[in-house]
Image (spheres, rainbow, N blue to C red):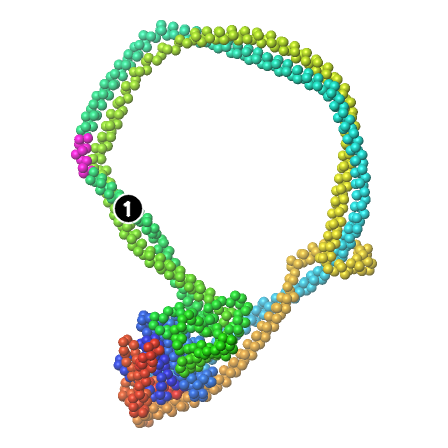
Amino acid sequence: MYIKSIVLEGFKSYAQRIEIHDFDPLFNASTGLNGSGKSNILDSICFVLGISNLSQVRASNLQDLVYKSGQAGITKATVSINFDNSDKSRSPLGFEANDEITVTRQVVVGGRSKYLINFFYAANSRVQDLFCSVGLNVNNPHFLIMQGQITKVLNMKPPEILAMIEEAAGTRMYECKKIAVQKTIEKKESKLKSIQTVLNEEISPTLQKLKEERASYLEYQKLVREIEHLSRFCVAYQFVLAEETKVSSTDILKEMQSNVEKFQESRAEIQQKVKQLSEDIAEMEKEKDKEVGGRLCALEAALSEDQRVNTKARSALDLKKQNLKSEELKYNELITRMQKDSKANKDGEEATLSGQMMICKNEISKAVTEAKQAQMKLNYAQKELKAKEAEFKKINEGYKKDRKAFEAVEQIKTTLEKQIKELNYSEEKGEALLAKKKALVSDISRLRELSENLMAKFPHLQFTYKHPEKNWNLNHVKGPVVSLFTVKDLSNAKALEAVAGGKLYNIIVDTEAGHANLHLALSLIVYESELQKAMEYVFGTTLVCNNMDNAKKLTFDKRMMRSASSQAVPILSKLQEVKAVEIELKKKESELADVENELASLKTVAVMYQQLKQQWEMKSEEAELLQKKLQQSAYHKQEEELLALRQTIGDKCEVKALVLELEELKQEQASYKQQITAAEEAIKSYQDQIDAMVAEVAKTQESVERAEKELAKQKEVIALHDNAIKEKSAEMVKYREQNNELQLKVKELEHSITKCQQDAADAAAKVAKMLKEYKWIASDKPLFGQPNTAYDFKSNNPKEASQRLQKLQEHIEKLGRNVNTRAMNMLSDAEERYNDLMKKKRIVENDKIKILAVIEELDRKKKQALEIAWKKVNEDFGSIFSTLLPGARAMLAATKTHNVFVGMEFRVALGQTWKENLTELSGGQRPAPVYILDEFIVVSLKDGMFNNANVLYKTRFVDGVSTIARYSQNQNRKKESAFKKPENSRKILEEVTGPADLECSPAC
């Protein structure tokens, strides 16, 4: 297996897609100036082989392998190597049917690395197994022997040299697999112990417990069956009672209805008698009213009028007496007050008039003195005020200047505060947005990783393409059909996949870019409209290309030839998870964009806020200093003294109101005589009115007594009529009581009829309900109450059966709390699980025996292959050494234990003297370098490498991009092949690595 071609795109210095093809199977070399991209070709080969030590390809991380680390708009690096696999005897395992094997590795900036084998996604382990199976383990410590490391190889310990031979023999991968299998066996052994522990400690006790629960459950079912039998018996008895109630209620109902009719007839007779008595009473009342009713009313009206007049006269008389008494009391009070005031006035004039005059004169003199003193103080305060005001005007100008400065600073402070408030900025808001951004970045990274992992499971959903023209709008290409719709019901997913088939991976576009290269066959013909359906059937699903190259790309391109196994993977049923992750990722990215926009806008606001805040603090400090200066100024002190003087002048003006209170005490004694005279006249008038009213009251009292006597006589006549009416009324009441008793009995009967009808209806409804609820009643009804049957109500007491049923139900209710009703199913599941575990245990044990036997057989074959490889390498090693150092011999010998499977060491003979290792040789005697493998890549500056190569590749570095040209030297003529770029169809040179020869033998 050797390299046929290499395709690089975006890898290191190869920005554009370059294909290096037509490698010679035997000897290839490359040359070029330093930094032109020679070594990058070797790095690309190691990259595809899966090198893990990136320092050997001069990179610190995978992103360094992308052209300019992704800073030039190229965000991924892709390398594809096409191997010739025509030699089936040395083909990798599993690829014997492929004549060519294409391995592609791609790394995306900020993403993960992925592999493709024959254009299908493959796991990293599968790629490593492919190369290891043909001895190409790039991660082997000695796969790359760099400059200056030959001495390190010569000083290897015997086991390390043995490892190199194992790698050459191809048994190293087996040894790694063997170690992995042995570890797996150890894990399985612990798993077997765990299974045995589960069997002994969990499943076996559970089985025993479930068996006991099954016995309890069987007993429980027995009770259930007995309860079911008793329930049927009791239900049948209740059904029979309900039917009997239904039949008997009819006879009882007829009897009660007959009694109701009899009572109704009796009530009619009594009501007739009551009506007759009522008419008699009405007639007697009418006669009574005719004889005495009118006279009695007239007498009662006259009596009432006399009593009203009498009462009114008495009330007026009482009112006049009260008024007379009130006037007398008022008169006596006026006399007493006048006497007291007259006596007090006389005594006061004689005793205190001279004293009162002296006291008054003293108070007037004191008030005049105080007024003069206050006037003097007022004059002094006014003079002092004028002086202070003159001094105040002198210092007013400086104070006003400071005052204006203070007010200006305060105004600026207010403006700054308003501007700060208008910014609506909060320092906590910025910190919260930063924390939110950090959380969103973490979520987006996690979702991207999850999306990439899910997309790796569904590689056919990944769709990449090259832009057909400059300034291409990505929205023109919608993508594969499978990613553009959602299945309503996932149960239909498999059927929809079968219907759509390969069309699920068709690409939907909304533009005609590139349509000139491809035509629908139906659009290339002309036909009658009536033949539309037929022509669609013949040409409707066929495409016609403008040239053979496009047709081959469309039909035979390896990327279009998908295997049946990949199409058989159910994708629609598993697509929901991918879409959910993508939706969540888009949502988080949108939130992150919003947060970043908000932070960007907030950044400007924050700068403005800090500037305004700094200005406000400065102005606050300036205002505080100005305020202290104003408070400590002489102007401020003078202003306070002026206010105090003005207050003193105002206080001295309150003395003039003390002299006007001496003339109001002599005007209270003149009105008593007039009031006494008016009271005497009122008393005399009230006495005359009272005498007239007493005569009128006596007259009205006589009229009242006379009317009462006439009314009494008339009432005696009425009483005779009333007695006759009472007798008739008593008889009518007696009949009414009888009528009420009959009516009560009728109502009781009607209630009983209603109850009976309800009982009958209930019984009928119960019968119907029981027939509907218990279907077995219809079939078993003829047996109800029959002797020697399950429904014999005579031999089996229904009451005792009901009591027995109740006890059993209570017992089974208690039992049901502890009985596991799922014991049967659980026991079956547990036994099935036990048998399954035992089966798996036996399988694992048998597999272990088989694996150990296979390992033993493979160890034997490994030793055979290793011995053959050792002999072959030893022979070639001695031949190469003798050629490079004539007269000397070399070999790989077994260690002192004489066992090549333990380790090997170098031995060199100069003449007949054997040296233990090459370190004993001089610098000129050492071969440089020493190669163990029979397939290798040599990096050297010797002229022979270039002159003897069959194919020579020359690299150049043009406009920041590496290019390469191919020269074929075995035909003594220069043959240069330039490869087209898809974007502009211009010829360019392909890329390769630096001043080195590149040789690939058939197994490379």
Residue at image x 23%, y 28%? Answer: 645
Q: Is residue 518 left or right of residue 951?
A: right
Q: Going by the image, does 685 lie left or right of 288?
A: left
Magenta span contains residue 397: yes
Badge 1 local density, few (<14 within 10 Å), some, or many (20+)? some
> Which residue is rendered at x = 30% and y = 17% of the image?
658
815 up-or-down from 266: above or below: below
Number of marks:
1
Identify the amino acid type marked 1: Thr
Classify the position of the N terminus by image quarter: bottom left
Q: Is residue 441 visible?
A: yes
Asked if residue 552 lies in the magenta stretch, the reply is no
Locate the C terminus by quadrant: bottom left
* SS class, disc 1: helix
Q: Please determine whether, in this image, residue 863 is positioned above or below residue 326.
A: below
The magenta segment is 389-399
Question: Where residue 871 sits: x, y (%)?
Answer: 41, 90
504 relative to 11 in the view: left or right:
right
The x, y position of residue 779, in whole percent, is: 77, 61
Give left or right: position of 823 versus 530: right
Residue at 36 percent of width and 81 percent of height = 6
Task: Report which residue position mark 1 lands on.
Answer: 415
Give the residue furthest to the right. 787
Can residue 332 be seen here? The reply is no
Q: Quadrant of residue 894?
A: bottom left
Return the residue nearer the eye: 669 or 824.
669
Using the rendered view, name the quadrant where residue 670 is placed: top left
Q: Position of residue 106 (x, y in %)?
A: 39, 75
Observer-nearest residue: 312 or 456? 312
Location of residue 491 (image quadrant): bottom right
Front-lying residue, 465 or 721: 721
